Image: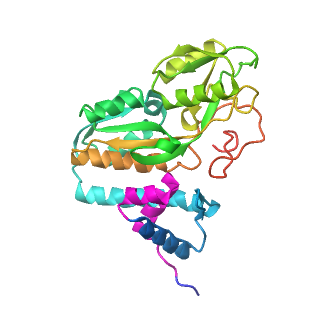
Amino acid sequence: MAMKRDLEIDLLRAFVAVAAHQNFTHAARDVGRTQSAVSLQIKRLEEIVGKRLFDRSRQSVSITHAGESLLVYAHRILAANDAALSHIQRPEAEGRVRIGAPDDYATYLLPPILSAIAKDHPRLQFEVTCDNAVDLLKRLDSDDLDVVVATHHADAALGQIARHEPLHWVAAPTYVDDPDAELAMVLFPTGCVCRDIALDALKQIDRPWRIAYSTRSIGLMEQAMLEMPSVSVMEASVIPASLKVIDGQTGFPALSEVVISVHQAHNRAPQVGLVADALRLRLGRHGVRGERRSMPTMPSAGRRGRHGLTTDPEVIS
C-alpha cells in the first residue's frame, strides 16, 4: 500500500503564484525565490500528486485540468493556513483599513470577502472608496488609501495578481444589434482597462461607435443599458443578472482577458497586510474559471478560454 504524502504549504504557494502569473519568472519574484527554485518546487508538487500541473513551452505556461482541480484546494488550504496563523499571531487585529476598488468590484466581489474577514477580526473597520483603478493607485501612492483592488491588462499586470478574468460584451435582454449601425457604448470613464480593450477591439474591425453613457457606477451603467439600446464590456464576475452576454455576434470582436491585482501601501500597519493578503487569496479562489453571477445569455456552443475551460456563462456558474 502506497504511503500517503502531504501537500506542503511552500509548494502550494509556488503553485498558486505560477497559476496566477502563468510565468515562472514573475511567480518567482512573487514568492521571493529564484526561477529554478520555483521550477523544482512545481516538479516536487507534481511528484506528490502524481499528475502534471502545467504544460510548459518556451513561449507559454498553461495550467492542466489536474492543475485546475488542485488550484481550488490550494487556495482553500492557503487561506486556512493564513487564517490560523493570523488568528494566533494577531488575534486582536483592529483599526481602520482604507480600501479602494472600482464600483463593480465593490458591489459584487468585496462584500462577501470583507464580511468573512470581519467575522474573524471583528475589531477591524473598513472604509471603501470607489473610483477608476488608475486614480485609486495615485491615492495609494499619496497615502490616502491602504489597499487597492485594480484591473490591469494581462500583459502588463502590476501588484499581487489574484486572478485572470475574461471579458464579455453585454446588453439588455431585449437588445437587437444592427451590425451596420453605429454602436452606442456604456462604459466606465477614461482610464478603465475594460473600456480601452473594448474600443481597441472595435477599431480592429472598423465598426463605428460612440460613447452614449459614461459613469463610475455599475448600477447606473446597468440602468442605462436597460433603458436604451446600448452595449458594454464587463468582467465575467461582475455582470449584473439583468443583462445578457452577446459574445460571438457579428460586429462584436473577441476580447482579451484582464488581471485583477491587489496593491498595498509600502509603510503599512499590520491590519493592512492582513486584509490585503485575505483579499488576494479569496479573490483568487475562482481565478481560473472566473466567478460568475447568474445571468441570461445568448445561445452558444461555448468557447475555450485561456486555460482551456469553457467560458460560456451558461455552462459554468
Q: Residue furthest bottom?
A: 1
Please tell me how many numbered marks the rendered image carries: 0
Taking the magenta stretch, the answer to whether it contains residue 270 is no
Q: Quadrant of residue 143?
A: top left
The location of residue 275, given as percent across then percent down, is 32, 45
The location of residue 191, given as percent across then percent down, is 45, 26
- The relative height of residue 41 versus residue 104 in the rendered view (above or below) is below
The location of residue 255, given as percent across then percent down, is 63, 35
| Residue at 49% from the left image edge and 33% from the top image edge | 108
The location of residue 221, given as percent across then percent down, is 54, 19
Taking the magenta stretch, the answer to whether it contains residue 15 is yes
| Residue at 27% from the left image edge and 35% from the top image edge | 141
From where the camera sits, is residue 280 visible? Answer: yes
Q: Quadrant of residue 126?
A: top left
| Residue at 74% from the left image edge and 33% from the top image edge | 248
Main SS, magenta region, reads: helix
Compare residues 205 and 193 and report the one nearer the observer: 205
- The relative height of residue 197 versus residue 291 in the rendered view (above or below) is above
From where the camera sits, is residue 76 visible? Answer: no
- The relative height of residue 108 versus residue 228 in the rendered view (above or below) is below
Quadrant (top left/top right/bottom left/bottom right) for the C terminus: top right
Quadrant (top left/top right/bottom left/bottom right) for the N terminus: bottom right
| Residue at 64% from the left image edge and 12% from the top image edge | 228
What's the coloring here? rainbow
Q: Quadrant of residue 234?
A: top right
Q: On the picture, is 271 further left or further right than 33?
A: left
Q: Which residues are magenta?
A: 4-33
